Each structure stands twice: as structure tokens, then as C-alpha cells.
């Protein structure tokens, strides 16, 4: 039997080709959208987090001139900074960022009870203010809204079918 004469087989092959084409193009499109969202995080917010970490280190440096390096305040800040350095995902980086902010607030408060020289008092205030300012910048980014929009689209037909078949996962939030 000739292939040209076997219409049912031709139809089956055509349907398979169409399904494969939809899955491949859908996968490429969805993975590109997800990659763009995640790149926006790593290209901008990650740099802000690194800057925040530097300010935290500066605040610890000021503190180390007045309190023991092994104090709970400095150790807590170092642990939070290490947590950020080891964080890979937006969620992990968010949790580390919150830890840095909390440790910085505690360090700021304890240093506020001490008699710092003029320069160190200025550094205490400015480094803490910069940490808080970066938190504000991070809150104002569109990353979570973009991730939410992508995730909502990913849960609607036909994207949900394509995603489940081709292994596209939701974008992780920075929260």
C-alpha cells in the first residue's frame, strides 16, 4: 500500500505534526517569557541586594569598633549576609534580605544607645538609611507583578497544558 493512498495515516501524521508544532512553539514562547522575568530579577534586583549587603557590612564595621565581633548583633548580621550570598532563588533572596533588614535594625538600635564619634554616628545613620531605601526600591519594582501576570497566564488554557507537558514552572516571587 502506498503512503499517498493511506488517508487515515496521513491525517494522523498531520495531527501529530500540528500538536508537536503547538507544543514546541508554546514551550519556546513560555520559556522565553519566564526567562525574561527571571532575568529582570537577576539583572536589577540582585544588584540592589548586593549593594544592600555592602551597606550591612559597613554598618557591621562601625559596630565592630564599639561592640565585640562575636556579639549577637554582629553575628546575626554576618549570618544574614551569608544567607544572601548563598541564596539562589528570588524567595531565598527575599528571606535573606528580610534577615539583613532585621539585623541592621537591631544593630542600628544598639549603636544608638552608645556614644559614637561623629563620623561613626553619621555612618550608622547613612548605612541604615541606605538599607531601608533599598528595601523601598525593591518593593517598588514590577518583578512580583510580572511574575504574577506570567503565573496567571500559565494557569489558563492552552498554556497550562503546554506547561505541564513541557515542564515550564511558575515564576518564583520575591516575597
Image: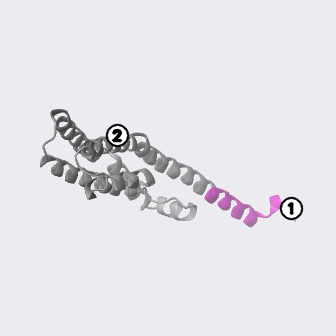
Q: How is the rendered protein coloured?
A: one colour
At 43% from the left and 40% from the top, the residue drawn is 43
Query: Is residue 81 shown left or right of residue 166?
Result: left
Residue 121 appears in the figure = yes
User: Callout 1: few (<14), some (14-19), or many (20+) C-alpha neighbours within 10 Å?
Assistant: few
Whole-percent x, y for residue 105 in the image: 20, 51
Whole-percent x, y for residue 144 in the image: 33, 51
Q: Is residue 6 magenta?
A: yes
- The residue that label 1 is drawn on is 2
Helix, strand or loop under label 2: helix
Q: Is residue 150 magenta?
A: no
Whole-percent x, y for residue 108 in the image: 19, 48
Q: Nearer the viewer, residue 107 or 83?
A: 107
At 48% from the left and 58% from the top, the residue drawn is 159
Q: CA distance from mark 1 to mark 2?
A: 69 Å
Q: Nearer the viewer, residue 13 or 87?
A: 87
Q: Quadrant of the N terminus?
A: bottom right
- The residue that label 2 is drawn on is 51
At 30% from the left and 42% from the top, the residue drawn is 61
Q: Is mark 1 in CB contact (under 8 Å) with mark 2?
A: no
Query: Is residue 100 shown left or right of residue 34?
Result: left
Whole-percent x, y for residue 79 in the image: 36, 56
| Mark 1 or mark 2, earlier in chain | 1
Helix, strand or loop under label 1: loop
Per the rendered image, the range of residues in magenta is 2-20
Q: Quadrant of the C terminus?
A: bottom left
Amino acid at each position: 500500500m502506498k503512503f499517498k493512498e493511506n488517508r487515515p495515516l496521513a491525517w494522523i501524521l498531520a495531527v501529530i505534526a500540528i500538536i508537536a508544532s503547538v507544543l514546541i512553539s508554546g514551550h519556546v514562547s513560555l520559556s522565553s517569557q519566564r526567562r525574561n522575568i527571571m532575568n529582570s530579577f537577576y539583572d536589577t534586583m540582585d544588584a540592589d541586594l548586593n549593594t544592600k549587603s555592602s551597606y550591612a557590612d559597613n554598618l557591621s564595621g562601625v559596630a565592630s569598633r564599639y561592640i565585640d565581633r562575636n556579639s549577637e548583633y554582629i553575628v546575626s548580621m554576618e549570618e544574614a549576609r551569608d544567607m544572601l550570598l548563598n541564596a539562589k532563588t528570588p524567595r531565598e533572596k527575599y528571606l535573606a534580605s528580610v534577615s539583613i533588614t532585621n539585623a541592621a535594625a537591631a544593630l542600628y538600635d544598639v549603636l544608638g544607645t552608645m556614644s559614637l564619634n561623629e563620623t561613626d554616628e553619621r555612618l550608622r545613620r547613612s548605612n541604615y538609611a541606605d538599607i531601608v531605601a533599598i528595601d523601598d526600591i525593591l518593593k517598588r519594582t514590577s518583578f512580583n507583578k510580572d511574575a504574577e501576570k506570567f503565573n496567571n497566564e500559565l494557569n489558563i488554557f492552552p498554556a497550562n497544558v503546554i506547561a505541564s507537558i513541557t515542564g515550564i514552572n511558575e515564576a518564583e516571587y520575591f516575597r
